[in-house]
Image (tube, rainbow, N blue to C red):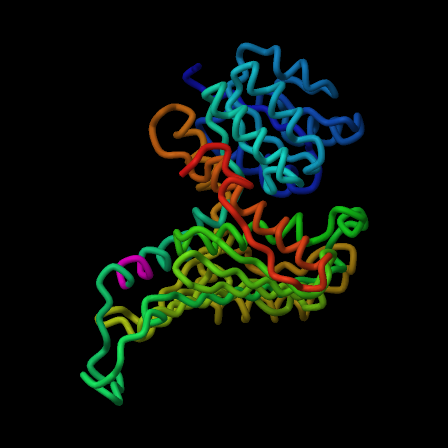
Amino acid sequence: MSRVFNMAVVGCGAIAQGMHLPNIAAHAGIRLRWCCDINPRTLKTVAARWKPDRTTTRIEDVAADPECDAVLIATHPEGRRDLVRTLAAAGKHLYVEKPLADNLPDILRIQRIADETGIVLSVGHNRRMAPALRDARDLFHAHRAAPRSEPWRWDREGRRRPPRPEERQTVMLQRINDDYFSWKAWAFEENAGILLLELNHFTDLAYFFLEREPVLVSAAGSPMMNVLINITFEDGSLCAIVDACVGTFGYPKELYEIYHQGAAIIVDHCMEVRTAGIPGQPFRRLYPSPGDAQAAGIEAWYDRTLEAAGRHTDKTKPLASPWPDKGHFRFLDAFVKACRGEGPNPCDAVCGARAAAIVLKAALSLRNGGKPQRIRPEEYLARPR
């Protein structure tokens, strides 16, 4: 591998232009070798702004370039299996946007391709690298490993309290406040919808925190927008995901709550972590916006957002709220290090497969009137655990 890490981006639409291309440009160790897209007008736009060495509408050009080390795939989920096969056969490491695939057979095939070729394949669940979420996860794991109660915790029965297996379970709540005005129309076409395109992030976070295999999934609502997902894990732990697409960007988008053995850990919009019930831990930790170091914590987010809302009149542009650090740049950096053999894969194909499989089972539950669906490792894991 060359000293400078040469990277291609395949699929140069909104997510690539809004997040991936800026992060690649900001990374001192990456050179943008290719931009590849089926739309020549899109290529013209990204070439003018991001100055890749080369552009093409043909994936074969990228695969044939011996100087290209890795490819970021940000295309529509359909057809990713064929892109992965072509690029992996050429020895390219792959950063694949979520979801890994839009069906279980392709999920299994993609894992096998990664195993057979030996490439690094990372699935873009960037929130795994968000500072607030990583700190919250560390707090939770430390508490779960050695739970301690605050001296003021009311133990009504004391030693007479009968032990219950549920005491060791975890309950996790995830609330997503979104606005469907901000989505392109194609996202609501048949076989797409917010369920497939967005909620993989949150099913992945459930496993990222709990590290227990999912066994049962049920859902209510619509795959297009507004959905409730309930996940039961092998140890009885529970995660409830509420996705509301009729909300507002005038309010923080994401709230995560984790409850375990007398403790609560709350992550508010990746800008604040609050803790209660764990001895010695502060109530609040604040995290700054990457674009505004002074905007740390949720109260600062409110202040900046209200200030921006008072000036905002252009309905064709988003409200300029502080952007939380959701780990995009850190994920890219971890991917590069994994490709160089300098660190672990930030989210391998197995983790990406699990997150997508939970969503696909939720979609099946919706098609069956909310009936709970069993989820088995052999359905989404190419190799036994």
In the image, 348 versus 94, the foreground residue is 348
Q: Quadrant of residue 34?
A: top right
* Residue 142 rendering spot, x and y as whole percentages: 26, 59
Residue at 72%, 63% (x, y): give it: 369
Number of marks in picture:
0
Q: Tell whether position 88 is magenta.
A: no
Q: Which residues are magenta?
A: 139-143
State left or right for residue 289 relative to residue 367: left
* Residue 12 rendering spot, x and y as whole percentages: 69, 33
Task: Tell me the quarter of the image containing the C terminus.
Answer: top left
Q: Is residue 298 above or below residue 90?
A: below
User: Residue 251, can we see it?
Assistant: yes
Residue at 63%, 51% (x, y): give it: 198
State left or right for residue 139 relative to residue 73: left
Residue at 39%, 70% (x, y): give it: 259
In the image, 58 versus 360, the foreground residue is 360
Residue at 68%, 53% (x, y): give it: 364
Query: Which residue reaches farthest bottom?
Result: 156
Q: Is residue 376 above or below residue 267?
A: above
Give the dominant element type of the magenta stretch: helix, strand or loop.
helix
Q: Quadrant of residue 78?
A: top right
Task: Tell me the quarter of the image containing the N terminus.
Answer: top left
Q: Is residue 231 above or below residue 260?
A: above
* Residue 193 rendering spot, x and y as whole percentages: 73, 52
* Residue 40 rendering spot, x and y as whole percentages: 79, 25
User: Residue 283, can we see it?
Assistant: no
State left or right for residue 121 relative to residue 334: right
State left or right for residue 2 relative to residue 283: right
In the image, 186 versus 336, the foreground residue is 186
